[in-house]
Image: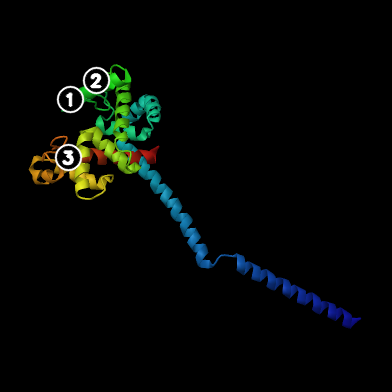
Amino acid sequence: MKKTNFNIFIVLFALLVFVVLIDQLRWQQTAPPADQTVLQEDTLLQNLVNKIKNKQKLTSIKKRILKRHIQKKIAIYEPVITKFSKRYGMDWRLIVAQILKESRFAEKSVSYMGAKGLMQIMPRTAREISRELKIQGVIKNPRANIIGGIYHMSKQLRFFRKAEFDNRIRFALAAYNCGAGHVFDAQDISVYQKRDPREWVNIRPNLMMLKKKHYPLHLKVWPSGIPEYGYFYDHKQTLNYVADIMDYYEMLKMIF
């Protein structure tokens, strides 16, 4: 009887040891290494820090470019901006960025060239828009000015359908600012240089090559020796225009 009890004890002890060993093996297989656990904790902490930094950055950006009075103006004009941006297949935030650059939402803004309104439309362009859209007050009425500006921007985008999205936006902004013809001439120079005319990085330096002093190059590009759409001297203004709006656009995409 005593021998039987001893045998049972041995069997139970062996089973207990077996269960402990199996459980230990399972834990070793499923538990992450110590260094991996530390790495996961560090990653979670870094993500939290990044979120805080991003929130602080957004707050700083918002204070810098969206002053209280501008936020109020955006709220006033947001319905017309979003409605017509959608109608013409554009991001409303790009239009807001453009208005920020053009007029800072000052309805009566007038440029030294005579462009007027929130989207700084030239009188000749305003007459063209009024005729095509059959609307009045493109210069004087802020909402009509926005509608006309969005429509005019959509026309510039159509000129550059073969370009990728980011390049296409930059081309259209440049065309809105200085006229599509000068952009076409800069593209002609890129073609002569055997560089892709659909890449903004190739067109940007060529806008400054449309001055009269570059006539030796012009003779190689155009039979007349003159850019097809005439000489161009305000390339810095156009390049800054495109760069500033794209900066605003990226910031607004973060905010909204």
Q: Nearer the viewer, residue 151 or 32?
A: 151
What type is the residue that disc 3 sits on? His
Residue 116 sits in quarter: top left
Q: For mark 3, what is the residue?
A: 235
Separation of marks 3 and 1 at Cα, in angstroms: 19 Å
Q: Nearer the viewer, residue 168 or 13?
A: 168
Query: Which of the numbered marks, if any, corresponds to residue 127?
Result: 2
Residue 70 sits in quarter: top left
Residue 211 place in picture, x, y as percent:
11, 40
Residue 42 place in picture, x, y as percent:
46, 59
Counting residues from the N terminus, which is met first, the one under dot 3 or under dot 2? 2
Counting residues from the N terminus, which is met first, the one under dot 3 or under dot 1? 1
Local SS, label 1: loop
Q: Residue at x 31, y 39 (%)?
A: 169
Label 2 packing within 10 angstroms: few (<14), some (14-19), many (20+): some
**163 lies above or below 138:** below
Query: Which of the numbered marks, if any, corresponds to residue 114?
Result: 1
Counting residues from the N terminus, which is met first, the one under dot 1 or under dot 2? 1
Q: Residue at x 22, y 44 (%)?
A: 204
Q: Residue at x 25, y 31 (%)?
A: 102
Local SS, label 2: helix
Task: Left or right? Give the position of 51 relative to 239.
Answer: right
